[in-house]
Image (tube, coloured by chain):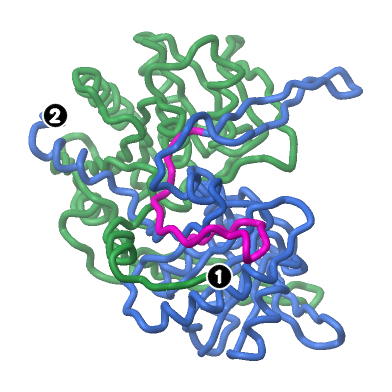
Chain colours: A green, B blue
Amino acid sequence: MRILLTNDDGIYAPGLLSLYKVFCPLYKTFIVAPESEQSAVGHAISLSSPLRVKEVYRDGRFYGHAVAGTPADAVKIAIHEILPEPPDMVISGINLGPNVGINLLYSGTVSAATESAILGLPAIAVSLNTYKDPDFGYAAKFIKKLIGEIKKRVLPKGMCLNVNIPALPASKIKGIAFTKQATIPLNERFEKRTDPHQRVYYWQIGNGFLKQVNTDTDVYALSRGMISITPIHYDLTHYPTLAAFTEDFSLNL
Amino acid sequence: MRILLTNDDGIYAPGLLSLYKVFCPLYKTFIVAPESEQSAVGHAISLSSPLRVKEVYRDGRFYGHAVAGTPADAVKIAIHEILPEPPDMVISGINLGPNVGINLLYSGTVSAATESAILGLPAIAVSLNTYKDPDFGYAAKFIKKLIGEIKKRVLPKGMCLNVNIPALPASKIKGIAFTKQATIPLNERFEKRTDPHQRVYYWQIGNGFLKQVNTDTDVYALSRGMISITPIHYDLTHYPTLAAFTEDFSLNL
């Protein structure tokens, strides 16, 4: 089995290293990841600027390829140029911080998995629910176990998994929940500041979610100390409205 | 009625101006758009850098606010900071070039509309199917007509419309199709080059779609000279797999 590892925190991130340590002894493991942190870049790709790729060594050994681009760029160039043949699985992460609810839209971690799905490859995005003192050990081992189960199944083409793991000792984790993406808005605002040259600028601040969420969502499961697994895809069509419009929307040219 | 106009080609783009010319005489019209071109940024937002906003004048009159950020940034700061009250409708475009199929994932134009939907506002992304010699006149007028129809309906919260318009004279347009997003991959590759310092770099090249598409998709409708209208949303959950996993996926902690 061949595994491609990528992320949005950059090739030097500890979350990526933790996956590498677990998978390298087991499978043919490749790393192609952004050279620098690319959080909140969403599904951006580089069309107006060229991509540079460089080899990265760690402790004197070849570690992987760093791409001066976004997570989606890294996946595309890995598949089309760098890897000798397509991997059997792409894992994006382990992200420092959760990727649940509408944050999926902004997440480079998730977009790397979605990009893999677009290219026809099974993929998992994995995030740890903390921004400080991360211990990625359990999360990496859980992904290993999850892949063992996934290998037994035929997954639909174009689908990938978004996994969020509580930053808790294994014994404190409450279970595993298959969830849907919460769609409630973020509790966000802008902080207005003035620079030393008396010019105004703004910082964007997102501070959790606006209100209580449904119990069948990723946001809820993670808040209750459960591992959340959400199957996602990239067909944005809103089928109920498509059916309604096709039925009764009258508009002439 | 209050309308917010934005785009991903930047506040000085002719496609935005064409919408402004049509809507300014009719409604209270605001422009908040990226300062520079932001194509293919997807749903990126700026968290690591502050946002600057400046007033832009055109022919000696106030035109709108330019945001040194992404289309999603522009929508967020418009709603949270700049506009006195939320608009009744957000229009993103008119984009130079189509946004159909999986390009929706990469599109800043579409992401501005999706971001508006996340914030609870009705929104339309509109793109013209050409990269050169654009005539945005008919497209802008069509959007005016579309809004007239939309105003008569109660649209589901969180849904927005992705509209693609052929670059044809009005008399040559074949009709209006309500479509789903095509999910076929792009025919893409990388061109490898060497710079004057003998270092390798890559250009990403996407050249149409890989194969024939279903006749009920945006890609097909546009290729046949029809206006394509796709209702889209931002819930990425793949419900069939969620149901299957909930039924029979066994995994322990």
Kind of residue at badge 2: Leu
Q: Nearer the viewer, residue A178 or B62?
A: B62
Whole-angstrom CA distance, mark 2 to mark 1, is 41 Å
| Residue at image location 57% in from the left, 18% down from the top | A64
Q: Looking at the image, is B96 positioned above or below residue A190?
A: above
Is residue A163 or residue B162 the one in the foreground? B162
Closer to us: A144 or B11: B11
**Disc 1 packing (10 Å; few <14; some 14–19; many ≥20):** many
**Are marks 2 and 1 in one subunit?**
yes
- The stretch in magenta equals B162-185
Q: Quadrant of the C terminus of chain B?
A: top left
- In this figure, which residue is indicated by the disc labeled 2? B251
Q: Does residue A244 appear to the left or right of B151 in the view shown?
A: left
Pick the residue in front: B120 or A244: A244
Measuring from the top left, give residue B205's x and y in whole percent: 67, 32
Question: x, y (%) of residue B66?
Answer: 71, 72
Q: Which residue is mark 1?
A: B75
Does the magenta-highlighted stretch encompass residue B166? yes
Mark 1, chain letter? B
